Image (cartoon, helix red, strand yellow):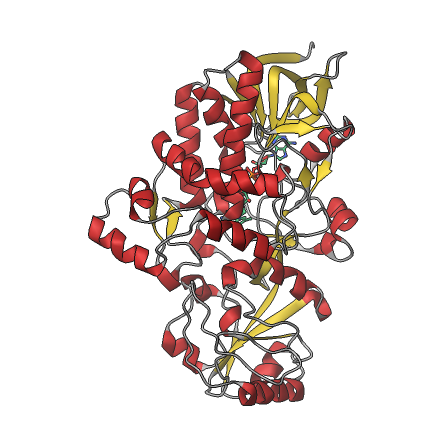
């Protein structure tokens, strides 16, 4: 049997948010577009289908009005009181702050200045946003994509199919095809029926990072990372990165750090988009208001050194380094009365007890140490008012402890006490390929662009180092997907 071949102007590998944005942009330029997706049609969407929000620049009402349908102006003004703006300067500063000034500044410039344009462009395609539901939703932004990432991706598929893009499911990219001049002209794939080669004038790699590959996790992130459970899809096993590096693509950004956050101890090994609901999320993001201890009953990190959206992506690593790779979020009855639990804590794995000793026994924590840790913590809390505002630190801190808590210090004294066992859940890796941020073209180790090859989303490295700000992955995927799709289409068929 002869091997099947296909031809497109622009071929996109992956069908997540970055890929779909690249496809929209290439179609805007009138390119023919083929999309290769490893997952089945039912499980299409990538990690992008499991998300909630994007973090973008807005200067006030006029910037968010075009994004939100069916909401009276007065209600939108009220929503904005929670967070009136995120200016370019504020957004730049927070990313530089969380990455310890290590974010690639050329990438960041595009990310920051194009985020607002990109969400407006997505709205022009048919996407919309809805208000984030305060404390009940685990989001730090005031808006969520309508239907979350799942809704965004379902709309993307419908819109792109209507616009003429062809999707090829259960089609795994395994190799890049080059001509004699080194130009990338195709992708070799493996399907359930065998090998097929797809040719194109330009190729966009948007097939995620290596978070689902235990061998690569151990190789790049270090000991212990091979055994972590995934928050997302099992499909992002790093072939895109490997294929590109095999032909000389330059690795870029932080390959030894990743996004990993506190998750329920019973987090499943991975998630698939089908049937997923953010209400069933296993994220356990009450830690800034809790006392977080390991099984020795000892604290190991300042639970609230910054806003939750700027710490959660680094908390997974801190938990992984504890005995057994687990930790416990301890809260007392006061927190319950305040009604500050996100709704996904309703099905959290938990133990409740009238005394700390009984709680420790139920959770297998060293009881005398836990009692001492709590006593010392309570005694160290300084005057001030606790305020669980997600967008503002309250400054309610401790003093004199080996590890102080900088904000949201709520004493643990009133039974029943609750303890939530958590583990590290892997989200995605920060290391990727070096791209030209202006057109998404992948750079060769020799310092020149690789003709015909573009990359976006998790595959484009450089923005995140050691930490991250919530909602940024989807925003970067959309922004650089659009950039790469435009760059690839121009290379393929001219401007
Ligand atoms: C549970 C969860 C919640 C999250 N919440 C948020 C949030 O609210 N906001 C936010 O900004 N970020 C969030 N993130 C991070 C976000 O999902 C990623 O940053 C973003 O989805 C990356 O987009 P992408 O298009 O690069 O990758 P993906 O959406 O993962 O898409 C990659 C696609 O490539 C396919 N693929 C992989 N290998 C191959 C191959 N060899 N051949 C063909 N196809 C292949 C995969 O099947 C997949 O469909 C969350 C992640 C998880 C797991």
At 63% from the left edge and 89% from the top edge, which residue is drawn? 372
220 w.r.t. 329: above or below = above
Picture quadrant of residue 82: bottom left
Q: Is 13 left, or right, of 246 in this rendering?
A: left
- Residue 489 visible in the displayed image: yes
Q: Position of residue 65 (x, y in %)?
A: 29, 43
- Please state which of residues 129 and 29 is positioned toward the viewer in this rendering: 29
Q: Position of residue 491 (x, y in %)?
A: 58, 17
Q: Quadrant of ligand 1?
A: top right
Q: Position of residue 350 (x, y in %)?
A: 52, 72
Q: Is 391 left, or right, of 107 in this rendering?
A: left
419 w.r.t. 483: above or below = below
Q: Position of residue 436 (x, y in %)?
A: 62, 31
Picture quadrant of residue 120: top left
Q: Is 436 left, or right, of 408 in this rendering?
A: right
- Residue 45 visible in the displayed image: no
- Please state which of residues 122 and 35 is positioned toward the viewer in this rendering: 122
59 w.r.t. 117: above or below = below
At 69% from the left edge and 52% from the top edge, which residue is drawn? 257
- Please state which of residues 340 and 467 is positioned toward the viewer in this rendering: 467
Q: Is 152 left, or right, of 186 in this rendering?
A: left
At 58% from the left edge and 56% from the top edge, which residue is drawn? 98
- Please state which of residues 9 and 366 is positioned toward the viewer in this rendering: 9
Q: Residue furthest front?
A: 89
At 38% from the left edge and 47% from the top edge, which residue is drawn? 58
């Amino acid at each position: 049997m002869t091997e099947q071949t296909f031809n497109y102007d622009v071929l996109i590998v992956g069908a997540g948010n970055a890929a779909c944005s690249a496809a929209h942009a290439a179609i805007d330029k009138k390119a023919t577009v083929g999309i290769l997706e490893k997952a089945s049609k039912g499980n299409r969407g990538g990690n992008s289908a499991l998300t909630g929000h994007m973090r973008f620049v807005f200067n006030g009402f006029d910037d968010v009005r075009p994004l939100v349908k069916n909401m009276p102006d007065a209600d939108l003004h009220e929503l904005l009181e929670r967070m009136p703006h995120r200016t370019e300067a504020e957004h730049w500063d927070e990313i530089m702050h969380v990455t310890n000034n290590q974010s690639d500044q050329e990438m960041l410039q595009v990310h920051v200045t194009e985020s607002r344009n990109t969400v407006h462009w997505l709205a022009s395609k048919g996407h919309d946003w809805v208000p984030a539901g305060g404390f009940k939703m685990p989001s730090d932004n005031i808006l969520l994509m309508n239907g979350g990432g799942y809704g965004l991706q379902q709309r993307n598929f419908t819109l792109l199919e209507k616009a003429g893009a062809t999707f090829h499911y259960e089609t795994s990219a395994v190799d890049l095809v080059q001509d004699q001049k080194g130009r990338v002209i195709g992708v070799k794939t493996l399907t359930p029926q065998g090998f097929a080669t797809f040719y194109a004038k330009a190729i966009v790699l948007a097939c995620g990072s290596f978070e689902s590959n235990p061998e690569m996790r151990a190789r790049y992130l270090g000991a212990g990372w091979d055994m972590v459970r995934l928050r997302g899809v099992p499909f992002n096993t790093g072939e895109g990165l490997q294929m590109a590096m095999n032909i000389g693509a330059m690795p870029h950004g932080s390959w030894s750090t990743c996004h990993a956050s506190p998750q329920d101890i019973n987090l499943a090994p991975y998630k698939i988009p089908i049937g997923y609901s953010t209400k069933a999320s296993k994220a356990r993001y009450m830690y800034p208001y809790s006392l977080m201890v390991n099984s020795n009953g000892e604290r190991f990190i300042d639970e609230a050194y910054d806003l939750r959206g700027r710490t959660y992506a680094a908390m997974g690593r801190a938990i992984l380094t504890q005995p057994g790779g687990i930790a416990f979020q301890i809260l007392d009855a006061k927190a319950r009365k305040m009604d500050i639990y996100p709704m996904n804590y309703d099905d959290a794995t938990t133990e409740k007890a009238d005394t700390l000793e009984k709680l420790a026994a139920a959770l297998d924590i060293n009881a005398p140490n836990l009692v001492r840790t709590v006593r010392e913590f309570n005694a160290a809390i300084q005057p001030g008012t606790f305020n669980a505002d997600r967008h503002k630190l309250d400054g309610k801190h401790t003093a004199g402890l080996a590890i102080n808590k900088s904000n949201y210090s709520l004493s643990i004294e009133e039974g029943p006490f609750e303890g939530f066992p958590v583990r590290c859940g892997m989200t995605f890796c920060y290391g990727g390929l070096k791209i030209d941020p202006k057109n998404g073209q992948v750079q060769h180790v020799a310092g020149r662009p690789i003709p015909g090859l573009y990359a976006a989303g998790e595959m484009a490295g450089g923005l995140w180092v050691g930490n991250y700000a919530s909602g940024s992955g989807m925003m970067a995927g959309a922004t650089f997907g659009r950039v790469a799709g435009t760059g690839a289409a121009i290379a393929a068929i001219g401007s």
